[in-house]
């Protein structure tokens, strides 16, 4: 004689305490019950009372399903949050690494900026001094204009050098600004990622605590790390009708053993059930 399996599914009683479905020897069958009602030997509920009890039971079932669906949603949410946390942590590591690199780039660039600014200021001062030293009229006459020609030639050379120094200073300054912009953007991304990581960890705390309560509430029916293989199949509900009619005791989630008798009509194992 086959042993009756224990029903410990996620959809079991709220307390999570495993139940064993056994046919009570003192419960009359339907035909006997109808006969006793007809003969007035047993009191029976009115149609209104039966409908009210059914509605109450249906609402109870709906509430239990809703509780378990919410618990399932919380359980599924945790891996998503953990994945998001890991992605943000990796993003933060990369942002910090990039921030350090950009800071080093800026530190190496600052001497070039100072040198370019100093060189530009020196060339400007040299140009201005030469510009103020233009030969006068008497010197021009006495040298037959040679002093002015020499001054103008040197002025052209100094002007070219000044323009080159100014362009170099501008290029160095633009590069420094680009480094500073990237530094600011990296700091902004890092700050945003750290803020998001804090939010995700705070968000994880609530469902994690609730999942712990769910696990305590549903007991062995609550899926966990050990809820695989035979342990998971043992938590799939098997009705007493299945055990008594088709002899199936592994659970409805597994393939039934070969049997010598057909599945009784009304058995959940039946494709028409």
Image: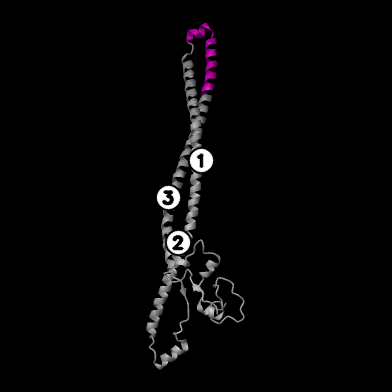
Residue designated by label 1 = 98
Residue at 41% of width from left, 93% of height from top?
39
Query: Disc 2 and disc 1: Cα gap in Å?
Result: 36 Å
Q: Position of residue 190 (x, y in %)?
A: 46, 44
Residue 74 circle label: 2
Q: Is residue 62 visible?
A: yes
Query: Disc 3 and disc 2: Cα gap in Å?
Result: 19 Å
Badge 3 vs badge 1, beta-carbon distance below 8 Å: no
Callout 3: SS: helix
Residue 78, placed above or below residue 141: below
Q: Nearer the viewer's eye, disc 2 or disc 1?
A: 2
Callout 2: SS: helix
- Specify few, some or many for label 3: CA neighbours under 10 Å numbering under 14, 14-19, or 20 or more: some
Residue at 50% of width from left, 41% of height from top?
97
- Specify few, some or many for label 2: CA neighbours under 10 Å numbering under 14, 14-19, or 20 or more: some
Main secondary structure type of the part rendered in magenta: helix
Task: Provide the residue span drawn in magenta.
Answer: 136-162
Q: Position of residue 72 (x, y in %)?
A: 47, 64
Residue designated by label 3 = 198
The total number of labels drawn is 3
Residue at 50% of width from left, 26% of height from top?
166
Residue at 52% of width from left, 27% of height from top?
168
Q: Is residue 173 visible?
A: no
Of mark 3 and mark 2, the one earlier in the sequence is 2
């Amino acid at each position: 004689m086959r042993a009756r399996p224990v029903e410990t599914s996620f959809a079991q009683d709220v307390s999570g305490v495993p139940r064993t479905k056994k046919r009570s020897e003192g419960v009359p069958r339907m035909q006997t019950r109808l006969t006793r009602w007809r003969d007035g030997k047993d009191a029976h509920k009115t149609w209104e009372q039966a409908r009210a009890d059914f509605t109450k039971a249906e609402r109870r079932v709906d509430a239990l399903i809703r509780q378990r669906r919410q618990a399932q949603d919380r359980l599924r949410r945790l891996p998503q949050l953990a994945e998001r946390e890991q992605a943000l942590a990796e993003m933060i590591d990369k942002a910090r690494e990039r921030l350090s690199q950009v800071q080093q780039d800026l530190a190496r660039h600052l001497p070039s900026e100072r040198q370019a600014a100093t060189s530009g200021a020196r060339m400007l001062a040299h140009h201005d001094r030469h510009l103020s030293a233009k030969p006068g009229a008497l010197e021009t006459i006495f040298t037959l204009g040679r002093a002015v020609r020499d001054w103008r030639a040197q002025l052209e050379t100094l002007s070219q050098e000044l323009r080159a120094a100014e362009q170099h200073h501008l290029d160095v300054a633009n590069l420094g600004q680009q480094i500073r912009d990237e530094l600011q953007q990296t700091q902004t991304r890092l700050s945003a990622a750290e803020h998001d990581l804090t939010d995700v960890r705070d968000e994880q705390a609530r469902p994690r605590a609730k999942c712990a309560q769910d696990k305590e509430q549903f007991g062995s029916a609550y899926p966990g790390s050990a809820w695989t293989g035979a342990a998971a199949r043992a938590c799939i509900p098997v009705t007493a009708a299945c055990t008594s009619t088709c002899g199936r005791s592994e659970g409805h989630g597994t393939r039934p053993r070969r049997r010598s008798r057909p599945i009784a009509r009304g058995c959940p194992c039946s494709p028409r059930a």
